[in-house]
Amino acid sequence: MGDLLDIPEFDAIASLAIGVILAVVTALLAYECKGLLIGERATREVVTGVREIIEGEPGILQVNELLTLHLAPDDIFLNVSLYFDDRLSSVDAEAIVSNLEIGIKATFPEVRGIFIEAQSWTGHTANEQPSR
């Protein structure tokens, strides 16, 4: 435009416009990637849905803790501490864990990694107390 109309200021305006576009794109990318870089939790719908699946499984008395972490946009890691009924055998507990993994991954395919810890509520709360 500067050569065509013999107005060299158009080159400066075009350079400024390109700079503004690059700055806006950089800000948007930084905003979108920040959560993935520092570890963003899963959406409320995923957390609520996973909790409902777990609480619907017989033999589980309580969900002590449920933590999620995005490892990539479509890759969630799930860490769960569960209080199993003491009357369950180890075979029954293993079956429950397998059922939970299958059910959670079928409902939420973005959950790719699941770690389930068996722990009593008293053991869980004792571990949360600061040591002296």
Image (spheres, rainbow, N blue to C red):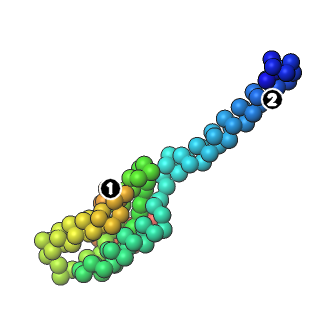
In the structure shown, which secondary structural element does the residue marked by tag 2 occupy? helix
Name the mark on residue 112.
Answer: 1
Under tag 1, what secondary structure?
strand
Quick one: label 1 or label 2, which is nearer the N terminus?
Answer: 2
* Vertical relation: 24 (above or below) 84: above
Q: Residue at x 75, y 33 (%)?
A: 17
The residue lying toward the viewer, choosing from 26 and 13, is 13
| Three-letter amino acid code at the position of disc 1 | Arg
Q: CA distance from mark 1 to mark 2?
A: 49 Å
* Residue 109 x %, y %: 34, 59
Q: Would residue 91 appear left or right of 34 to someone viewing this image?
A: left
Q: Amino acid at mark 2?
A: Ile
Q: Between residues 82 and 126, which one lies in front from this camera angle?
A: 82
Of 3 and 11, nearer the camera is 3
Q: Residue at x 46, y 69 (%)?
A: 45
Q: What residue does disc 2 label? A: 13
Q: Which mark, by number, is residue 16?
A: none
